Image (cartoon, rainbow, N blue to C red):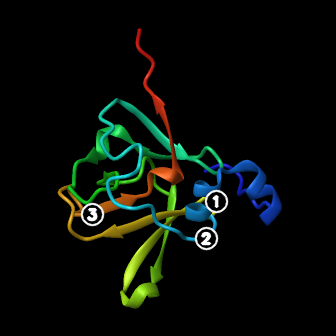
Amino acid sequence: MSERIDLTDAEWRERLTPEQYRVLREHGTERAFTGKYDGNKAAGLYRCAGCGAPLFASATKYDSGSGWPSFTAPAAEGAVDERRDISHGMIRTEVTCARCSGHLGHVFPDGPGPDGLRYCINSAALDFAPEKQD
């Protein structure tokens, strides 16, 4: 993983759109079925919208029906951090970017992959880099 990125609040506000700031820095959530990557089926890599770190590969993306982009695993070990989240009267596991600590979404134990995980991620927290076509 690349060197950690620590910016001031003013620097984050300058770098991010208001919606990206709300999600990544204020732990917000976009409404279900409104994010630009929920229905994206193109091959490529999903990067952190805050710092550009590689987070999820399209090969692990699937349609969970939840209304948010869902993945079975991060792109690489150490790409994301997880921590207990007890906000909103629920016990969940929050997923953050390991490089900049930006809030990405949550991981749930109801996915189809080999580990049975569903990384439910906000589109506003992601930038998509399509695979290059030859």
Q: Amino acid at mark 1?
A: Tyr
Can residue 102 be seen here?
no
In front: mark 1 or mark 3?
Answer: 1
Give the mark, 1 or 2, whose residue is nearer the N terminus: 1
Q: Is residue 8 left or right of residue 25?
A: right
Which disc, if any, is residue 6? Answer: none
Say which residue appears at 41% left-offset and 53% top-offset. Answer: 74
Secondary structure of the residue carrying numbered label 3: loop
In front: mark 3 or mark 2?
Answer: 2
Q: Is residue 33 left or right of residue 77?
A: left
Secondary structure of the residue carrying numbered label 2: loop
Say which residue appears at 45% left-offset and 50% top-offset. Answer: 123
The residue labelled by disc 3 is 117
> Which residue reaches farthest left?
112
Q: Position of residue 97 (x, y in %)?
A: 56, 59
Say which residue appears at 60% left-offset and 51% top-offset. Answer: 1
Q: Amino acid at mark 3?
A: Leu
Q: State the residue in front, 109 or 2.
A: 109
